[in-house]
Amino acid sequence: MYEETMPIKVLYFASLKELFGRSEQQLSIDGLSTVEDVWRRVSEGYDVSQQVLYSINQEYAQADSLVKSGDEVAFFPPVTGG
Amino acid sequence: MIKITNNAFDPWQELSTFQLEMRRDGEYGACANFIGTMRDMNEGDAVNGMFLEHYPGMTEKHLEKIVQRAKGQWDLLETLVVHRVGELLPNDPIVLVAVWSAHRKDAFEASRFIMEDLKSKAPFWKKENLSSTNQRAEKNRWVKKNTSGY
């Protein structure tokens, strides 16, 4: 059986967008199971000292939340609105 | 109603327009509201301006979820949330939360709940533009954390 997998869309906001120098990227799902796996992959080689929050498909996620083909994953610092 | 706007808004105008148009005259006995405004000082430094970023899509969804949760917990007639994004200047209104109910307990408690959840969980981020007269090397800085409201 041939199963087509869509890449995941990864978004960055605020200071993380500046750190990585981009607001989004596409990533192959191969070898990635949890949102923390995704974070390790994209932050490799960067010195991230601040707290990072995760979301999957625009809902807050935990480090061990599972990601699947086609998901929109986002990484951002603690929120400071209002 | 939830509104996220790039443009400066007048919270008093928003309140009176919404209250007229919601057509609940005679039903509400209480309206509690909170207005957050940009200061010109933070952590001892003069601030010239601010950039407010958000996560289009998730921000609206999250605010909608907060309001729905409040409606499940208190007896509310109407709610209004307006939040500014983009470039702001000191004294610009940032946020308006208003809640209408029959009695004050519901309006007071629900508006507080919505506001505190917005401050701690809704995806917005502030970047301050510091005054050129300050002695620091940095001219722009991200606000690291919101203060606790409780």
Image: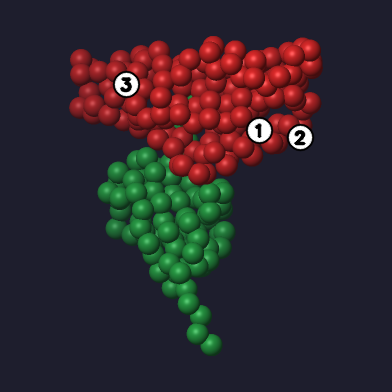
Chain colours: A green, B red
Q: Position of residue B71 (x, y in %)?
A: 73, 32
Residue shown at the point (30%, 44%) measured from the top left = A18
Label 3 and label 2: CA atoms lie apart by 38 Å
Callout 2 amino acid: Gly
Q: Mark 2: few, some, or many residues within 10 Å (few <14, many ≥20)?
A: few
Callout 3 amino acid: Gly
| Secondary structure beneath label 2 | helix
Q: Position of residue B59 (x, y in %)?
A: 52, 39
Q: In the drawing, does residue B88 fall left or right of residue B82?
A: left
Q: Chain of mark 3?
A: B
A32 is higher (above) or lower (below) than B76: below
Q: Which residue is mark 3?
A: B49
Residue shown at the point (53%, 54%) measured from the top left = A57
The number of numbered badges drawn on the structure is 3
| Secondary structure beneath label 3 | strand
Callout 1 amino acid: Val
Q: Position of residue B88 (x, y in %)?
A: 36, 22
Q: Earlier in the sequence, mark 3 or mark 2?
A: 3
Q: Chain of mark 1?
A: B
Residue shown at the point (37%, 62%) measured from the top left = A26
- The quadrant of the image that shows the C terminus of chain B is top right
Q: Earlier in the sequence, mark 1 or mark 2?
A: 1
> Same chain for the residues at labels 3 and 2, yes or no?
yes
Label 1 and label 2: CA atoms lie apart by 9 Å
Residue A48 visible in the shown view: no
Q: Chain of mark 2?
A: B
